[in-house]
Structure formats: structure tokens, C-alpha cells
Image (cartoon, rainbow, N blue to C red):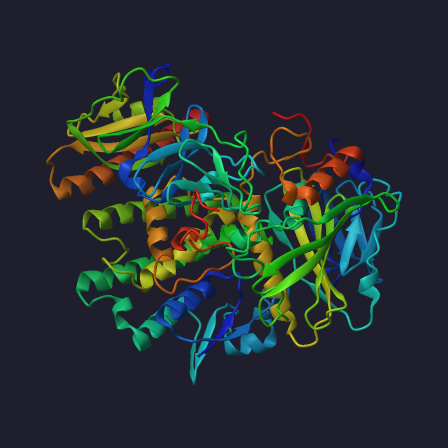
Amino acid sequence: MKLYDYVLSPSCYKVRLMAAILGIKLDIRPVDFHPGAEHRGPELLALNPAGSIPILEDGDLVLTESSAMLAYLAANAAPEWLGQGSPQETARVQQWLSFSHRLTANLGGARLHEMLLRPGNIKALQAQGIAALRELEGGLFEQGERGMQFLAGNRATIADIACFPYVALAPDGGISLDPYPLIRLWMRAIRSLPGFIEMPGIHRLHELKPDPHPAGEK
Amino acid sequence: MPFDGAGSWAPVALSSDLPPGTVIPAWTSAGPIALWRSQSGRATASSDRCPHRGMRLSHGFVRGEALSCIYHGWSYSLSGGCIRIPAHPDLVPPETIRVAVQQIEETGGILWAAVGQATTQPPQLDELVPLRSLSVEADVAAIEVATGVKVDSRGLVRLPEFPWIGLLLAPQEKHTLILLMIDRDRSPADRVAASRIVESIRRTAEERHREVAE
Amino acid sequence: MKGGAMIDEWYPVGLFSQLSAKGNRTWLMGEAIEVARDQDGNARVTTAEGRTLPIRVQYGHVWSSLGTPEKELFAIPEADQPGRRFVDVGVVRVRCSPLRAVENFLDIAHFPFVHTDILGAEPHTEVENYKVEIRESVDEVWATQVKFYQPQAAKSATGGITTEYMYRVPAPTCSVLYKTCPPRPSEWDVITLFVQPLAEDLCDVWPWMALFDDETPMTDLIHFQQTIFLQDRSILENQIPALLPLDPGMEIPTRADLTSVAYRRWLKRHNYTYGAQLVAQ
């Protein structure tokens, strides 16, 4: 499986993260998104006329939507990541996958503006981003009331992986995560998953490594 | 106005927002804090700034009974002293390297910070259980207008249409923290309903706050 | 305007390769400027009032100044060596003081925590003594004999090595790092941070490199350096106070911080105060 990838892209990271958790080896083809705008160059436009990344190629299957890539990886390696099959859970996975696309626009748009100087109405993007984070916080509260730690059930699904990167990087767009205690706990649960990998701006939990020098010793 | 006098208490977070081995950003009248809970369960409020290069300690990590700064790993004990500087593993850090620590009490599922020197215990709110905490971009006055009720001496607002819901208000620097609370023994459906009701109140209060600001 | 002597220095304002006739609007020390390419293909920088600013084109970037620089832009002789590959890493905007951005670049004690398993890893956190001086003849801050154990020091490194470094500050918002070059151990790889101050608490960072590396694809080199810088960005946006304190009292350095101590002293001596605060609060 070949992933056309940009190390700083949260959408590309969704795929890298899912693959790492599932133990799938991806053949990474780096794309010079910034400053080179290679995703809009002739070679990549021929593969994906939408001009976006990530792109996932597996034989003659070419996928250009990160949600589809997550579903493909899960379907191949560990279908429980798609949900356990009940209509409610299936619906919740879809609900939060759709929600994750809105995050690309609001949180992602704010980040591109503040960090990589892309055009945008930053005040509007930040207001929409805050509204989305509040929606997520409320949703996590209600899931918690059902005894569930993740968005669609009591175990993580592709819906969590789809929402995680843009949420974790909200501060890049000038949107603080300070006011969301449940989002913080949910992000911690995701960062604690076996196989979790970092991306620049989302670092690992150092506390998961045992203290090399416990206090009181040298 | 509640919580603005010395010798009283302000809520800063729910206990459930702070599992063992975690640190979160919070706020007290003494300034921003890194509110953290050691592995053994003790909660502390350290000033949210490492004295080395000014990095926010709330971005750090907890190992055992110490809070470490994410920048260079400087570690602080529950009483605020720096106990380790990884760049100099053999150095015993001088006692002058420390962060200010504030008194925290934990009762009724709420973490309270003392405002000044506390002479009493935090308010008893035994009839209520906390559900979640929310930040509102509006002051207490706007929330009082949105609910139609003034805060009582404990900082609590009981909603007239839903008297089983209580909102504990804590004014912070630029916004208000609301701890959503309900009477004990309400149904699961009531708990979810309360969450949606307080979100609706937040929308109204923020709109009012924006109108007043214009 | 605040900033003291910094107004008469050169600052990066764009990538030469990305200039267009249409021009790019940006800021320099609070002033709106436009960076464009004229009909002869030369760079041109003007203020909103139409004043033409002095320019230089060097190290792949366009440089300008709101004042009158007395010196030419600093030299990097290694950049003239045959076989060097130049890497335009691309701009990243950071909500921090330009001086905080430079000081972070000079620091190595954060490697195991911020650039974990790349530039450093626990338990190899010790920073051994190194040499720091302000070289009066060139009026630059230099740190030499800096050593650190690194799991993956560069894209061209095949495993963990003890990397040797030299750091140099030739201008208030620029730093040059010389590090062990894995393919040619007798040479240095050159990695720079050129920082454009937009405001005292907002800057555009333009990293650039001159390397000996014929193997690694250009995009991989760009991504490696962007990875490192993006790992620092959330640190830079969360330091308090935002302005760099030049007086002792607010912040506590240790022996590992000798380069930053010298940098702050050098800034104060020159009255380079744009992005700094003077009285400990």
C-alpha cells in the first residue's frame, strides 16, 4: 500500500496512525505540500484531480478520502475498528466521520492560516472550530453517560482516529484546548493505545515510559 | 458576590477531570495553575510556569509523585521544589528553584482552591452531584439574566424550570466556569437532559454578553 | 518605534524562488510591506506608503530592512563549497517573540523531551560542558565543542551517534548551526534559522540548509527539518512571558544554558530589544 504523504498533514497522519496501530506497513511517498505545492502539480493531479493529500494506492484501488482509507485499513486488518455491527454503533461511526470532515474545514483551515499562511477568514474559522469542539465535548459527555470512553462505543473505532488529529492540533490555529476536560481525557485514551505514533505537534505521553531516574535516586 | 473574599474557596475542576498521573490547566484568583494529581492520588495546584524558561507546566507530564516540564524535563515535587534537572543528573537542584503551590481541597467530587488563607472548609453541597464542567464566554451577570436567577451565597444558581439542576459558577479571568450539578438519584435521562439544558443556557448567556459588549 | 538598534538589521522576508509579479503582503517589525519580483526578475520590497526598502538576495531568501544596515548580510563560507545541496525548508508562522524562536534553536537540553528518538532520548539527557564566547572581532555569539548523543541526528544518519555541534548567532534573529555531517565526517552540515519579526510576539521562521547529502530526496530533507521545527512550535507558543527577558530574575539558567545566557547578554549590550523585555516583572 502506497501513501502519498505530507508529514505535517493531520489527514495524512490519520492514515499513518491507523496503519501503525494495526501493524500495517505503508510505503510512504513524501509529497512536497509546503513550500513546493507538489499536490497541485501535474503528476499528483493526474492521480487525484481534487488536488488533495493523502492519496492511498493499493493495486488499482486509489482512494482520495482519508475516511475511506481508514475504513479500508480496518476492513483489511481488524474490522472491529469499524464498529461491532449494531445499527446505533454503525450510525455513530458515520456521524463522527462526517463530523471529522467539518473539522478539516474549521480547525484545519484555522491551522493552515495561522501556521502556513494560507488564506481564510480566521475569526469565522476559529468561531466554527470552537463550536465544533463544544459539540465534541458534549458528545463525549453523553458517551460517558452510556459508560463508553470513545465516540462510537467502549473501544476506539475509525471515528476516533478520524477526529483526533485536527482536535489535538487545534492550538496551531489559535484555538485553545484548555476549556475541554473530556476532550483532554479522550485524547489521552487515544495516545495511550498500543501502537500509537506521534506527528510533529502531537507528541507521545512521556509518562508511559517508566521514569529512568525515579525521584530520590540518581 | 461569592468567592471573592479571602478565606473562601473557588471550584477549579471536577475530580473526574483529573485522574491519577495527569495534569490539566486551570485558573485561580492567584493566576493560572497546573492542576495535577500524583500517581498516589494527591492533587496539587502548581503555578502554571516553569521558572527555567517560562514554559507552561500544564503541558507537562506526571511520573510518580512529581510533575515534569515538557520543555527540558525539570521535575517538581508536590510541595513545589525542583527535584531533578535532567541536563545535570548529578546535581541536587538548589532549594531556590521552585514553583509556588496552592492549597487544594477535594470534596463532593469537586477540586477547590483556597482564595487567600482558607480558615474554613469548602462549601457543603451534599444534596448535589457534579456532572461536567463548562467554560462560558460571559460574566456571571449574563448567566443570571439567561437563567432568571441570581447566584446564592455559595455561588449556586438553581434553575427555576428545572429546580433539580444547580449551576455552580466560578468567575475566572475572562470567562466563567460552570460546574453542572444535579440532585442525587436523578435518572440517566435527566443527566443527559441537564447537559443539554446548560449548553442552551450558555448559548443564551453568550449572546447576551455579546449584545452588551456591542 | 520600539526595538532599539534592531531596526537597522537585515531580515528574511521571503523565498526568492517564490517571488511573483503580483507580490506578497507581509509585515516587518509592525510595518506592512510587499515583496515582489519586478519585470527584470529582481526582488523588490516596498512599504504600504510606497517607500522602497533596501534588499539583498542570499541563501535562497530575500532580505530587507526598515532602517539602514551598516554591515552586509553575514557570510556563511560553507555555503560556497562545491557539492553543497541547498534546502529551502519553507516558512512557518509562530505566535512568539522572534528572540524566543532563536533561543530555542540554540538549546540542546530539550532534545530528549521535544525531539524524542530523533535528536535525543532518555536516559541520555546530560548536557556536558561546552565553550561559549562572544567573538569580538566579528561581534557574534559562538558555542563550540557541543556534544549530544542522538538516535537519528540527520536524514543521512544510519543509527545513533554522538553529534558534535557549533552554534553561531551573527544577527539578532538569525542562527547558524554546524553539525556533524554523517556522509563526510570532516565537514559540517549547515542548518540555519532565519527569523522575520512581524511583531514583537509574532514571527515567520524561514529554516534553510546547506548539506553534503547526495542520497536523500529533497522532499525528505524538507520534511525532516519541518518535523523538528514543528515539534518546537507548541513550546514556543506557550512560554511566559511572551517577550524574552533580558534581565536576570524571571528565569533560571543552568550550565547547560550558556549559549542562551550569552545570547541574552549580547542582545542587551547591543540594545536589540524588539521582542524582549528589560525589567524583571
| Residue C63, horizontal then vertical, whole percent | 79, 52
Give whichever of A147, C7 is nearer the camera.
Answer: A147
Total marks placed: 0
Q: Position of residue A218 (x, y in %)?
A: 49, 47
Of A8 and A23, nearer the camera is A23
Side of B79 relative to C172 (left or right) = left
Q: Nearer the viewer, residue B162 or C265?
A: C265
Q: Say whether residue C6 is left or right of residue A75.
A: right
**If the image is split into quadrants, where does the N terminus of chain C sit?**
top right
> Left or right of A200: which side holds C262?
right
> Looking at the picture, how far across and down is residue A55, in whole percent?
47, 73
Measuring 56% from the left and 39% from the top, which residue is drawn there? Answer: C239
**Residue C11 appears in the rendering:** yes
Quarter-of-image position of residue A208: bottom left
Residue C240 position within the rendered picture, expressed as x and y whole percent measured from the top left: 56, 35
Q: A77 above or below B54?
A: below
Viewer can see residue A102: no
Residue drawn at x 73%, y 34% as measured from the top left: C273
**The quadrant where residue B88 appears:** top right
| A208 over B76 or under it: above or below | below
Pick the quarter of the image with the C terminus of chain C.
top right
Q: Is residue A132 left or right of residue C234?
A: left
